[in-house]
Amino acid sequence: MRSRLHILPAMLLGFVLAGCGQSAPSKPDEAAGMAGMEGMPKGEAGKPADKDAVTLTTQQITDAGIEVGRPTVGGVQAALEVPALIEGDPQGVQVVSATIGGRVVALTRNLGEPVQRGGTLAILESREAASLNAEIEAARARSTLAQSNLRREQRLFAERVTPEQDLIAARTAAIEANIAVRLAQQQLAATGGGGGALNRVAIRAPISGQVIARAATLGQTVAADSELYRVANLGRVTIMASVSATDAGRVRSGTSVEVTAIGRRQTGRVTFVSPVLDAGTRLVQIIASLDNRGGQWRVGEPVSATFQLAGAGGSGIAVPSTAVQSLENKSVVFVRTPNGFRAVRVTTGRRNGDLVLITTGLTGQERIATTNSFTLKAELGKGGEMEM
């Protein structure tokens, strides 16, 4: 009996060790499986996370400077954005030409200097001017003599010495002499006149403005009608743009146009839509007027012009241009979710200033990231979770 009792514990120990030996190999496999599960991204209810979602807390959204708002629904009018060029107002740019042939003896204004209407820009010395001045003096002398003869004939007629016919002839001669004086003065005035000497004429500014070009040189001999200066009143400028015939049909005189350049933005009005196509480009020319009393626009400057198109229905959904990002060559807008944001693919239409029309993808009721949405795009590339 004693030997059997010693054998029983030994058998029980063998069974325990055998059981331990069978279970030990399964532990590394279970550990590897758990490690694999921990490495898998999970969403709600243990499902894999949405690859288009970015998980953010409210504080993280605030710290990233992301603003949230709703799309604009209704009252959104389509717009046409085209390149344009700033030009001077045709009524505000004047070429100042030599009114008479001669030699330039004085130039009173340089480039960029202001000038008032009627102000002297240049003085020309001319033999023709001397002739005109001499004609005025001769006409005045003849007028003086005619007036003296008229007074004498009036006295003699009153004394009944001369007939009325002589009085009428004297009166006619006096009138003709006065006409000759006025004609000579007007001929000199047409050249500018007032040059300070009989052989000099002053060239005057036709409008108030600023000298933007000076072709004359001191001492230069110029012919009549030669350009000397160019004066512009740049308080108002025009923009020139060309659009297709289809788009031109939706632009009207008085249509609002937004002109933009780097760091500048201003609204003007369309003043002219050409009724014909340009023979070379087959496009329609559009002219708009722009207030430039602040002097922020320069003639010849390229700008961008956005025209509000008529007949666009005045409805639709629009979002700020800063809300639209490109993801996998498709446009997306980041829509707010309880856990952060989700990239929603959209189809965009025309731009309307700072807004972009959305034709498909949004209902208009969503809350979207309106600023710094590029941060969310970057987070998608890092796995959708912002690092603190």
Image (cartoon, grey):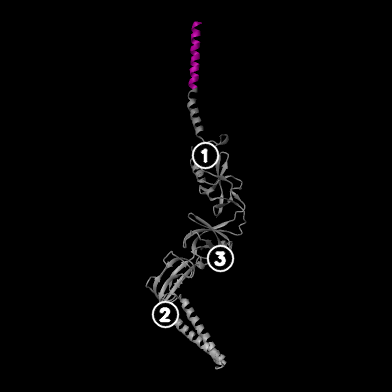
Observer-side mark, 3 or 2, equals 2
Q: CA distance from mark 2 to mark 1?
A: 86 Å
Q: Could you say which disc has been placed on residue 272 in the image?
A: 3
- Disc with the residue nearer the chain's start (2 vs 1): 1
For image coordinates 50% across by 30% down, the residue present is 34
Three-letter amino acid code at disc 1? Gln
Q: Which residues are magenta?
A: 1-22
The single residue placed furthest to the top in the displayed view is 1
Mark 1 element type: helix
> Is the residue under label 1 in contact with that under label 2 (CB below 8 Å)?
no
Q: Is residue 54 above or below residue 213?
A: above
Residue bearing mark 1: 60
Q: Do tag 3 and tag 2 residues touch (Cβ < 8 Å)?
A: no
Q: Position of 198 compared to 385: left or right? A: left
* Viewer-closest of 196 and 128: 196
Q: Height in image: 385 above or below 250?
A: above
Closer to the camera in the image, 176 or 260: 176
Q: Amino acid at mark 2?
A: Ala
